[in-house]
Every structure is written in C-alpha cells, then in structure tokens.
Image (spheres, coloured by chain):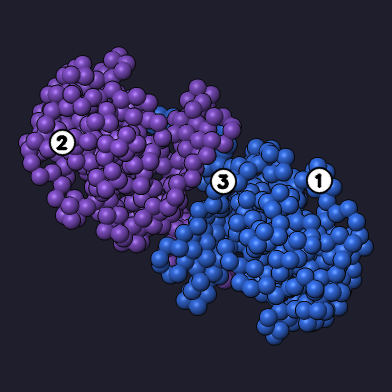
Chain colours: A purple, B blue
Amino acid sequence: MDGAAKAAHELAIVPEGMIADLLTRDAAFDAVEKVFAAMAAGDAYNFPVVREAIGHEDALYGFKGGFDRAGGVLGLKAGGYWPHNLDRRGLINHQSTVFLFDADSGRVKAMVGGNLLTALRTAAASSVSIKHLARKDAKVLGMIGAGHQAKFQLRAALETHAFERVIGWNMHPEMLPGLAQVADEMGLPFEAVDLPGLRDADVIITITSSFAPSLMAEHVSPGTHLACMGTDTKGKQEVEAALLARATVFTDEVAQSVTIGEAQHAIGAGLIGEGDVSQVGAVINATHPGRTSADEITLFDGTGVGLQDLAVASAIVDVAVARGIATVVPV
Amino acid sequence: MDGAAKAAHELAIVPEGMIADLLTRDAAFDAVEKVFAAMAAGDAYNFPVVREAIGHEDALYGFKGGFDRAGGVLGLKAGGYWPHNLDRRGLINHQSTVFLFDADSGRVKAMVGGNLLTALRTAAASSVSIKHLARKDAKVLGMIGAGHQAKFQLRAALETHAFERVIGWNMHPEMLPGLAQVADEMGLPFEAVDLPGLRDADVIITITSSFAPSLMAEHVSPGTHLACMGTDTKGKQEVEAALLARATVFTDEVAQSVTIGEAQHAIGAGLIGEGDVSQVGAVINATHPGRTSADEITLFDGTGVGLQDLAVASAIVDVAVARGIATVVPV
C-alpha cells in the first residue's frame, strides 16, 4: 500500500468516438503486419481465449489477451457480442474495449475503445495476406459477403493493391449495392456475379457468418489468393474443405485455424494436417517462401487474435498521446 | 459506428489511492458473503482463469472474470505478480485492476484499483467462513504465517468474531511481532507458539506460500475451524492432507479447490473425493447444515475467485459515485 500510495501513475484513455480520426488504415496495416511477424518469430504470443455465453441478453463475453515482447505490448481486449443492442438500445452489437498494461510493472496504462478498431484490424489482416500472398498482377477482386464488415474489408483491400475491378456475391443480393458504393468511391467498377462468376477473381475475400460453405473448389481459378475472414467459431464454414487441400494454407495463428477457423473442416476430414497450415508471419519474415508460382492457390485463414487488437490499440494510444488529445487520468 | 458515435457514455474510475478510504472491512465482508451465496445458488459463476508466465520480469499475468446475474455484476480483474517491482521500482509486487462492464450492453462502465481490494477481499473470505463455520464460543485464534496478507487476515477475523487471545507460528519467527501489533491494536494478547501449541486454538487461519505442509493433523484439536487461505497453485500446501480427511471441507469454488487449492493433495492421495468438498455459500444459503457438532473440525479452502473481486469493486464504485468522488470520464 505504501508503494501504491507513493506511486500514482497515469492512465491514457482513447474513447470510441475518437478512433475514426486517429486510426488510419495504413497504421492498422502496419501494426497488424508487424505483430504477425513477431508471432511467427516467437516474440509475441496470444493467451488462451475466454469466451462465455453469460446467460443474459444472449450475450457472448470474453477476453483475448497477449504479450508482444518485441513491441513491449501487454494486455487484453474485453467485450463481446450483445445481439439485442441495436434493437433495444440503438447501440452496435459488437462491443469491446482494449486495456494495455505496462509490461515492466503490471500497472494498467491505457484504455481504448475497441469497436471500430476491431473492424479495422480485421480488414488489415486480409490486406496483409493480399500484400504477401496474392499475385502482383492480380486485377479482379471478388467478395463473398456484403455486410458491415465486408465494406471494411473491401476498402482496405483496394487501398493495399491496385485492383481494376470488383465482383461480388452475397446470399442476400439486395445488400450488394453497399459494396458497389465502396468500389465506386475508390473509382472502380463493381459487378454482382453468381458463384461460378468468381472464377474471374484473382483475389477473393470471404466475410460471412455462414455455417455451410458457399464458395466451392470449382469456383476458384488457379493462381487465386483467398482470404477467408468469417470463420471464428466451431461449426462456421465459408469455403469447401476440398479447396484447402488444393491450396497452400496460411493463417494468423495455427492453433485457432485448425480448431475454430476455416481449416477446422479440412483438418476434421483428414484432407490436410496441422503441419500444412503456416503462419503468414513466416512469409513476412521470409522464413517461408509464400507463393511460389502463378498457378498456386493461396488461402489465408484469418481467425482474429488478441495481439492484433493490442498492436492497433497501442499505435492509437501513441498517436493520441503525441497529439495531446488522449484523456489522461491519474490512477 | 453511428451507434457508437451517438452513444458516448461514462466510465467511473476509482484509483488505487482512494480504496483505503472507501472500502471498509464490513463492506468487503458483505460483498463477499453475498457473492458466495449467489455462486452456491447458481446465480453467479466464474470464468476460466487465464494465468501466464509472460517471460518478462519473471511476471505472472492474467485474468479472473465472472458474472453475477443476481447482482448484475460483469467483468474481470487483470494483473498479476511482478516479483521485482519492490526492488526495482518501489512498487508492490502484486498489481491488479478491476474492470466492470454493463451486463445489458457490454460497454465498460468502471475501473477500480485492485491491489488493496485483493487483500481485503481475501481477508473477507476467511472471515465469512469463520462467521458461518466456527463455534460461536471460539476464544483463541491461531495464525500460521505472518506476512503482509496475514495482518489483513488477522484484523478481519478479530472484527468478525469476539476472540479473546491470538497465538501464532511462522517459519520466520522474527516476523511475528507484526501480528502481535495488530492484536494489540485490537486490545488482545498475542503469544508466539510452536506448532503443537496450535492445539489451543479454536480457529486457525493459514496464510503462507508454502510448498510443504506445516500444520499437521496432530496439531489441531476437535472442534477447530480452519481457514486455509494460502494455496492457490498446483503444488502449494499448508496443512497435512490427512487433516482434510478428518474435517468437513468447504471452499469458495469446488473446481479450484480440488485442482489448485488446499484440497488438491487430499484428493490426489484419494483421502477425500470431490463430493466431499462443499461450497461455503451453501451454508450461507442454509442448503448445507455447515457445522453440526462442537467436536467437528471444519476447514475452509479459500482459493480466491474473480467474483470476489468484482463484488467488492462494484460496492466500491457505488460508494464512490454516490459520494461524487469517482473520476468520471466520457468514453
């Protein structure tokens, strides 16, 4: 207590409403690329995930923590999914907050609104995979899914690579104009296609909450890079398992990929083994060759890890503190 | 994002330095007693504990979360043990912070310094067990252990029950004057004893970080209540396993008691089964008879659960907000 009394310190708070002005897609991309590299180098690791159906408001709540020794970033994202928020309270259903701790002393040092941050770090992950795994001459971007997160994915992908055209499919085609608008903002044509139409795509991003595959192996041409971003739970599935057997498979974290990610089905069916799934960070670090031919299908299984949240939150705090706009409170 | 923008809300912060003035032992006792009752009634539960040796500063870091549906309390304590804090930084080695969330919406609503709070909630747990399990005519309190936390335990016990005398043993007897001082403050005599001397005690609190038992079954008289508060990790042990076979065993949470609590050894040796360990909350709720004779030995295995932290933190926030002294920040 003596120690605590004499050692009041400061907490930097960056509220949700400030994130849009502070976090550029470039900064999110850089933070996620760096932390994927640190994970593959063994300098950063994620803690076991806690995820609980709390039996109230049908909410899922939990914690994703981690430590990046290279970046000195320690903490967690806490929050979850409150499915009735929008209807009952006019709030978005995904609610989360990131807390950062001083790795030298264990004291809390920052709190960052996690809602927009989560959307941008998820979009950054597929973009990182596109930079490191797609063909340099890729021209057509295909989208599966057209919800809220799909627009973040599309914007980030179009800023990462010089695509010439966007095509898209969604279970509910009436939502596709949302994607067309984003493409238009970026000066690109958009075309709604049926699933076989995805054969024209050089890169495909899947971002749905599906429990059955929509994209089949026959819908994917040789040389395509896929970023499967929607599967983060046992049972969810976006693409046919056979596609993973045909592809060179990468992920953010192998342990999640093979249990709750898109790879769970190909693993379960014995089509691939855990050893067939590589960290995308190894490609960033050049310890894995990545794509080795123009005909190779590459697939990134983006499951989402706490370290992405921490890395992006840490970058936000640095900017907010440097600009003097964080709320700083003695604690 | 529209939802987030239009729905800025407030975070209440109660810094560590404010806790000593806000948290009475009575309030800690009431909060812990209530949440033990809620746990036994199935209205409150703890999440899986995350505890990581992060490979930096020899620190242990993690999260203890839970949800008390009855009290509407949701959140976690984050932090851990930084063994070099005192030497290197003049800070206490145990560092933690409690975060509370709105169970209806998933938004963060409070942050509370967790250091003193942890000491007081741990002391409150043994006191709750003394109130509900010790003989009403208990006169002599025995202490095993004389460190920082032992003083908290002693103070809380002396406020809970009208003891007439305190006796104590510690591996390092030169620390016992710390206990004598607390007893003296409460107007009671203190006597240092050897382990067989503990046979005079009606209630014994063990609060050490030992990996081998010091208190043996032969040191404990019929009718004694024991509160074993030090064992929270695989391998730690304060009392001889045979003592648990002779006692009626209670705990805060059975799953922790039998794996990382004092009961792990008696369970491992086959002396008792998991079914022999009952929740102290069941005694509070009168669904378990508790002590049934003056000769019965009762033993409370206090392992420490996240819900204790959340309950006490929630009570602190209520008081701080009511008095208008919490730091309130829009987030």
> Between disc 1 and disc 3, whose residue precedes?
3
Residue B157: quadrant of the picture? bottom right
Residue A312 placement (x, y as % from top left): 33, 48
What residue does disc 3 label?
Answer: B47
Q: Chain of mark 3?
A: B
Residue type at numbered disc 2 = Ile
Residue A184 placement (x, y as % from top left): 18, 23
Q: Are marks 2 and 3 in contact (CB under 8 Å)?
A: no
In this rendering, the answer to whether A207 lies above or below B36 is above
Q: Chain of mark 1?
A: B
Residue type at numbered disc 3 = Phe
x 50%, y 31%: residue: A82
Q: Are marks 1 and 2 in contact (CB under 8 Å)?
A: no
Residue type at numbered disc 1 = His
Q: How far is disc 1 from disc 3 in space, using C-alphas?
A: 24 Å
Q: Chain of mark 2?
A: A
x 26%, y 58%: residue: A41
User: Is residue B118 visible in the rendered structure shown here?
Assistant: no
Q: How far is disc 1 from disc 2 in space, using C-alphas?
A: 63 Å
- Tell me the mark number nearer the camera, choosing from 2 and 3: 2
> Which residue is at the far front?
B270
Residue A125 placement (x, y as % from top left): 27, 42
In this rendering, the answer to whether B121 lies above or below A133 is below
- Choose between A37 and A299: the one closer to the eye: A299
What residue does disc 2 label?
Answer: A297
What residue does disc 1 label?
Answer: B288
Q: How far is disc 2 from disc 3 in space, using C-alphas?
A: 41 Å
